Amino acid sequence: MRNSPEYVVKLAQRMRSDMTPEEEALWFRLRRRKVDGLRFRRQRPAGRYIVDFYCPELRLMVEIDGGVHCGREEYDENRDAYLAGCGYRVIRFRNEDIDHRLNEVIETIRRIAKEIREQAL
């Protein structure tokens, strides 16, 4: 069954070995706690969904929207609403952001991480 937990876990494992160039570029910058010491995981199951990058400490999810997301805006909005309802913060970037403004993407992630930390105080 497509939405079974076992299926989602297997799909996430497969996706980790088949990342897009944009996912690889962002992962290179996020991995090994390179952004403010935050630990990110890649292609992680979250309920019936798989998120591109996830920081468990902050419950922060980072999504990269490529061509597959065109025409799926309503699906993405519903997905984000579901995840927000579960207590996650979701931020999205487009492939073009990763390709042309990766430093700005990293700074945005830093800023949002700081906001989440400050709200927790």
Image (cartoon, helix red, strand yellow):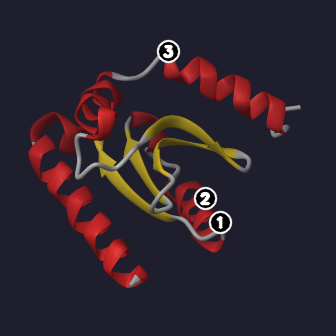
Q: Which quadrant of the rendered structure holds the N terminus?
A: top right
Closer to the chain start, of discs 3 and 1, is 3
Q: Residue at x 26, y 57 (%)?
A: 109
Q: Position of residue 100 (x, y in %)?
A: 10, 38
Q: Amino acid at mark 2?
A: Arg
Give the Cα separation between the discs numbered 1 and 2: 5 Å
Q: Please, which residue is most extreme toward the right here?
A: 1
Q: Are marks 1 and 2 in contact (CB under 8 Å)?
A: yes
**Quadrant of the image containing the C terminus:** bottom left
Q: Which structural element holds mark 1?
A: helix
State the residue position of label 1. Answer: 82
Task: Give 71 or 68, whichever is nearer the viewer.
Answer: 68
Residue at 22% in and 59% down: 110
Residue 39, position in %: x, y? 39, 44
The residue singled out by tag 2 in the image is: 79
CA neighbours of label 2 inside 10 A, class few (<14), some (14 to 19), many (20+)? some
- Horizontal side, residue 47 vs residue 51: left or right: right
Kindly identify the amino acid type of the residue bearing the numbered disc 1: Tyr
The amino acid marked with disc number 3 is Ser
Pointer 3 residue: 17
Which residue corresponds to the image point at 23% horizontal and 52% vertical from the top-left? 36
C-alpha distance separating marks 3 and 1: 27 Å
Task: Say whether residue 82 is visible.
Answer: yes
